[in-house]
Image (cartoon, rainbow, N blue to C red):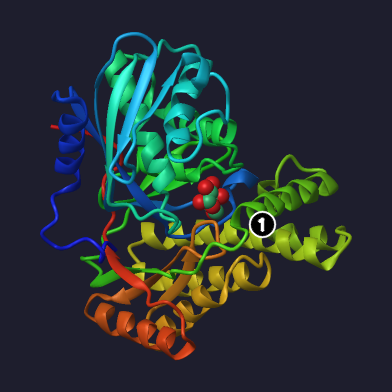
Amino acid sequence: MTPDRPAAAPDVADRATTGFSHGYDAQPAGRWAAPGRVNLIGEHTDYNDGFVLPFALPLRTVVAAGPQPGERWTVRSEIADQPVDFDAAEADSPGRVTGWGGYVAGVVWALREAGHAVPGARLAIASDVPLGSGLSSSAALEAAVLTALADLGGLDLPAAHRPRLAQRAENGYVGAPTGIMDQSAVLRCRAGHALFLDCRDESVEHIPFDLDAAGLAILVIDSRAPHRHADGEYASRRAACERAADLLGVPALRDVPVADLAAALERLPDDETRRRVRHVVTENQRVLDTVELLRAGRVPEIGPLLTASHASMRDDFEITVPEVDTAVEAALAAGALGARMTGGGFGGCVLALVGADRSDTVATAVRAAYAERGFTAPTTLTALPAPGTTRLP
Ligand code: GLA
């Protein structure tokens, strides 16, 4: 999904190293890579204490880093001409550092708030994860920075605690009320597996997801839809779910089993709330059903669950836009076994489960449908489950 970069462009890790050596006239102490992610199924379930099933993409953000004396952090990015520089006082004031630097300052803030002695550092960032496409470029940045600072400072930071810290950076410093899925995915995913995460207790199971063996592929289609009011709509969906849980007298919508859905819906005051709840409750069940099928090696059979998830997001949760609906419809018409929007909504990406030999046909069909409606041409990527965040050799 990097059509704008020529094929011969340097590897992302080399770009981070070069950014560091040119920017600071020194060599980095190390390089840390964090992937983007797609969510196979389980949308807007994470902040309802429910289930999600993301996997990591082969597109990565790399941070080259080295120590800097005192409590000072300097960050260079290949997308910015000027470095961002902040000290402890600025890191300790949520929202003070803005733009992409805010994610870095947010990580320093979250670590300091949790009582860690964060080492001063110089960092250089390069990324192949497209920005604003719903593939978790922000979580990738948070995870790479968090892991770099933890290693540089020798911080005692168990792997299972890291997603909450990265999420805290985003919620508490940047101010985006997101759930725990993206940070868990980029930090905890394994190659060849999807991550079955229970967002209530953060327990995980790595579910083998061998697309090659099944003769299948996941085509990721960037809808290129402009994000329309995505932040406000996300926050309002989250608030609606929390209000509904209150009305139903449960800690979170996760506590409404699908078998009790009809009775729960009768207790809700209006049609919109009923539809929001129906999405979350049925989506949790679709995640569980998908996991069962994957455990049994019945990969092609997850297709209808993906498509049902999309219908639920479109009709009940109302978070899709014409571009993503068009991509899903065109992919299905061209023979995809299932297709759905992935991520927070109002744009972003669609994933389609396709026969390995149908990937090009489906991509071409989606492009044709876009052209017919006058939408900006979509970009595509064939995704295989990649590893989570690592230190590079
Ligand atoms: C965004 C958020 C996640 C999750 C998804 C929707 O990606 O960052 O926490 O809520 O939307 O599933």
Image quarter (top left, top right, bottom left or bottom right) of the N terminus: bottom left
- Nearer-the-camera pick, 324 or 212: 324
Above or below, 324 against 130 in this view is below
Residue drawn 21% across and 66% down? 212
Q: Nearer the viewer, residue 20 or 233?
A: 20
Using the image as rendered, state which of residue 354 and residue 366 is in the foreground: 366
Q: List x then y, in percent, for residue 170.
A: 52, 36
User: What residue is disc 1 on?
Assistant: 233
Question: Which residue corresponds to the image point at 49% horizontal and 21% vertical from the top-left?
Answer: 91
- The residue carrying mark 1 has its beta carbon less than 8 Å from ligand 1: no
Residue 218 visible at all: no
Residue found 26% across the figure and 62% down from its top: 2
Which amino acid type corresponds to the residue marked 1 in the rendered image?
Glu
Res. 39 image quadrant: bottom left
Query: If the image is split into quadrants, where does the C terminus sit?
Result: top left
* Location of residue 335 with respect to 87 vertically, above or below: below
Q: Could you say where residue 53 lies in the image, as x and y percent from the top left?
A: 45, 53
Secondary structure under the numbered disc 1 in the rendered image = helix
Residue 127: image location, x then y, percent: 28, 47
Residue 177, position as x, y percentages in the image: 61, 42
- Quick one: label 1, few (<14), some, or many (20+) residues within 10 Å? some
